[in-house]
Image (tube, coloured by chain):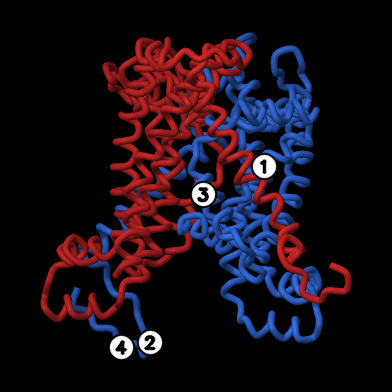
Chain colours: A red, B blue
């Protein structure tokens, strides 16, 4: 390297490499390394501390025999399906309404989006209060004269997950609306002009032209909503803490509880590996759509 | 109905047609749904407990009291301690400020290296980083705890700052990389011809003209880190619990009489920082989340 003006190999472009060291460490140590570690140790009998005793799929067998895990999966499935359906339809509907050259568009947009700035803890606590069985909506409606009105989803094992859904949708649909609105603004004005000339009703234009055109936007939104659903944790902690009983447990909470408070690491790691598998399954179609055929075309 | 207007005005708003009416009605109903919780929070926090027990959650306070706010800030209890939310607020600040600075400093330089000083393998690491951002945090939590413990920083402010830097890196790097890549290459080339090096070009040429993207990044990080619960509860250590954790401990504390007005005041106080940022910076906030939305 003595006096060489163009050093080769490792020292070439050295500053950029130094700048990228945090990224390289994050990518290799955290994202790859930690994931492999977790997957690996999910095949061991680790309890409060990680041990190297290989037990095959025993943790997974136990996991799927645990009723709490089954409830968690069922809950996240219900929450996921409804959350995707409602946030896409509500988000699109709101965006379509806002796209009609309405007055006060900014005011409406600000109102629809502000809950997204709030944390899930704040969201959960507000809705816990609104849905409070003693003082909340039920109490108010009964006070109006509807004595038999019953709406206390938080204290009912069968409906508590829908209470989480109401709160989650309140927090998250604004984001979907914002993305959809950006998508709608990207639609060529000519399409609207042409359809007006042809006398095609607006809803038909949306269904047969606009929505198919916005497929990439929908897919991106879906991935975004999907990864949010898998991470659902804070909202449950704030709103129900898994109750009543274990009726609103979710996978992320199962992992946390078994790892950090119950000292059953193997179970936590097995559960987290299942979460990872679910995410990969969701991601593959997206990666295919985003990077697959388009590159070849 | 058939009165004709003779005023020589320009674009006069037309009468509401039924379909226009439906549009506004729909928007209005939606607005009520989104505003209701905020309204209930504020109203509840201004009532005394007797009024809350008697009245309904939607009615405005008959007698406005700010005592719940004072209690929430100064003396609300989390388990054994009754020092109010202010402890959590200052903890959150201690976490927030260094985390935002460190994460943005690292990610901006990294994004710059990735767009202007590509090296062998840089794209591979970047791809791992982006794909990795979709891995559920739960998968990486435990090994991260081990790493932090080995480094001797588990349960300290340093640990939580490192964690926020790690998990903020994918989106921030993407943001900066795309921004720098969209700047004219001539700028960069001209600076190089003038003999400027890696750091000089970044600090003296590119960074000063990239203020908007730094603003977007700050907003993204401030709201994200302020709203964090999971990392704070695991990595920060009990004495550094951020505001969200403390809020949850206050409101969901099992012992004592529930003071709903104090709880709601505390909830508003915790939501206030991101809300203020949101209302002040609407346009940039939307840009930030839009950037987050179009990953890849």
Which residue has dot 1 on it?
A: B164
To the question of a shared chain for discs 2 and 4, the answer is yes
- Of marks 3 and 4, the one in the foreground: 3
Residue B152: name its quadrant: top right
Q: Position of residue A197 (x, y in %)?
A: 14, 81
Q: Secondary structure at mark 3?
A: helix
Residue A81, given in percent of the width and then of the height, sits at: 29, 36
Q: Which mark is residue B87?
A: none
Work out whether mark 1 precedes mark 2 in sequence or the reverse, and give the earlier one: 2
Q: Quadrant of residue A281?
A: top left
What separation in Å lies between label 4 and label 1 (alpha carbons)? 64 Å
Residue at the spot 81% in from the left edge and 82% down from the top edge: B195
Q: Give the labeled residue for mark 3.
A: A114
Residue situated in front as seen by the camera: A54 or A107? A54
- The chain letter for the residue carrying disc 3 is A
| Residue in the image at 46% along x and 28% along y | A273
Q: Which mark is residue B6?
A: 4
Give the quadrant of residue A257: top right
Query: In the picture provided, is B64 more to the left or to the right than A13?
Result: left
- Asked whether the viewer can see residue A115, the reply is no
Residue under numbered circle 2: B9
Secondary structure beneath label 1: helix
Contact between marks 2 and 4 (CB within 8 A): the answer is no
Chain of residue at mark 2: B
Chain letter of mark 4 equals B
Please tell me whether residue B186 is drawn above or below residue B139 in the rendered image: below
What is the spatial separation of the Cα atoms under label 2 and label 4, in whole angstroms? 8 Å
Upstream in sequence: badge 4 or badge 1: 4
Residue B101: x %, y % from top left: 75, 52
Q: Residue A29: x, y in percent? A: 64, 40
Q: Residue furthest front?
A: A2
Label 4, secondary structure: give it: loop
């Amino acid at each position: 390297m003595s006096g060489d003006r163009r050093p080769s190999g490792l020292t070439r472009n050295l500053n950029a490499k130094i700048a990228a060291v945090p990224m390289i460490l994050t990518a290799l140590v955290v994202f790859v390394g930690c994931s492999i570690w977790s997957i690996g140790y999910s095949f061991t009998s680790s309890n409060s501390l990680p041990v190297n005793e290989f037990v095959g799929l025993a943790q997974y067998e136990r996991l799927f025999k645990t009723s709490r895990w089954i409830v968690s999966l069922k809950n996240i499935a219900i929450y996921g399906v409804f959350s995707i359906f409602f946030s896409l339809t509500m988000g699109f509907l709101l965006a379509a309404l806002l796209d009609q050259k309405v007055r006060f568009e900014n005011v409406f947009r600000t109102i629809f989006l502000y809950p997204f700035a709030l944390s899930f803890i704040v969201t959960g606590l507000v809705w816990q209060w609104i849905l409070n069985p003693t003082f909340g909506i039920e109490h108010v409606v009964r006070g109006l004269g509807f004595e038999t009105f019953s709406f206390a989803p938080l204290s009912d094992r069968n409906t508590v997950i829908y209470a989480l859904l109401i709160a989650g949708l309140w927090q998250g649909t604004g984001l979907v609306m914002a993305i959809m609105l950006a998508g709608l603004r990207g639609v060529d004005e000519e399409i609207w002009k042409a359809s007006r000339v042809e006398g095609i009703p607006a809803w038909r234009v949306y269904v047969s032209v606009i929505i198919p055109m916005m497929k990439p936007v929908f897919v991106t939104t879906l991935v975004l909503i999907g990864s949010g659903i898998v991470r659902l944790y804070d909202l449950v902690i704030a709103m129900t803490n898994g109750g009543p009983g274990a009726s609103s447990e979710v996978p992320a909470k199962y992992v946390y509880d078994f790892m950090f408070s119950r000292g059953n690491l193997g179970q936590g790691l097995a559960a987290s590996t299942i979460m990872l598998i679910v995410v990969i399954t969701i991601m593959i179609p997206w990666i295919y759509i985003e990077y697959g055929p388009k590159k070849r075309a | 109905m058939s009165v004709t207007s003779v005023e020589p005005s320009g674009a006069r708003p037309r009468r509401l047609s039924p379909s226009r009416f439906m549009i506004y009605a729909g928007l209005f109903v939606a607005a009520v749904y989104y505003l209701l919780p905020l309204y209930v929070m504020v109203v509840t926090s201004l009532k005394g407990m007797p009024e809350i027990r008697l009245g309904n959650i939607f009615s405005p306070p008959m007698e406005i009291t700010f005592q719940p706010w004072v209690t929430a800030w100064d003396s609300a209890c989390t388990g054994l301690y009754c020092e109010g939310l202010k402890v959590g607020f200052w903890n959150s600040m201690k976490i927030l400020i260094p985390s935002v600075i460190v994460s943005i400093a690292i990610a901006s330089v990294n994004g710059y290296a990735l767009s202007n000083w590509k090296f062998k393998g840089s794209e591979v690491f970047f791809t791992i980083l982006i794909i990795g951002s979709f891995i559920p945090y739960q998968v990486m939590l435990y090994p991260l705890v081990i790493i932090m413990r080995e480094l001797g920083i588990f349960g300290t402010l340093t640990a939580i700052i490192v964690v926020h830097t790690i998990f903020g890196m994918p989106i921030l790097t993407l943001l900066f990389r795309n921004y720098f890549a969209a700047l004219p290459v001539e700028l960069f080339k001209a600076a190089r011809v003038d003999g400027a090096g890696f750091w000089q070009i970044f600090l003296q040429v590119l960074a000063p003209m990239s203020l908007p993207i730094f603003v977007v990044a700050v907003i993204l990080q401030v709201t994200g880190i302020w709203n964090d619960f999971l990392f704070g509860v695991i990595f920060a250590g009990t004495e550094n619990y951020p505001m969200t954790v403390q809020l949850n401990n206050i409101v969901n504390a099992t012992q004592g009489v529930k003071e709903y007005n104090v709880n709601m005041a505390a909830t508003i106080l915790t939501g206030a920082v991101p809300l203020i940022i949101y209302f002040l910076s609407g346009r940039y906030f939307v840009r930030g989340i839009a950037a987050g939305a179009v990953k890849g």
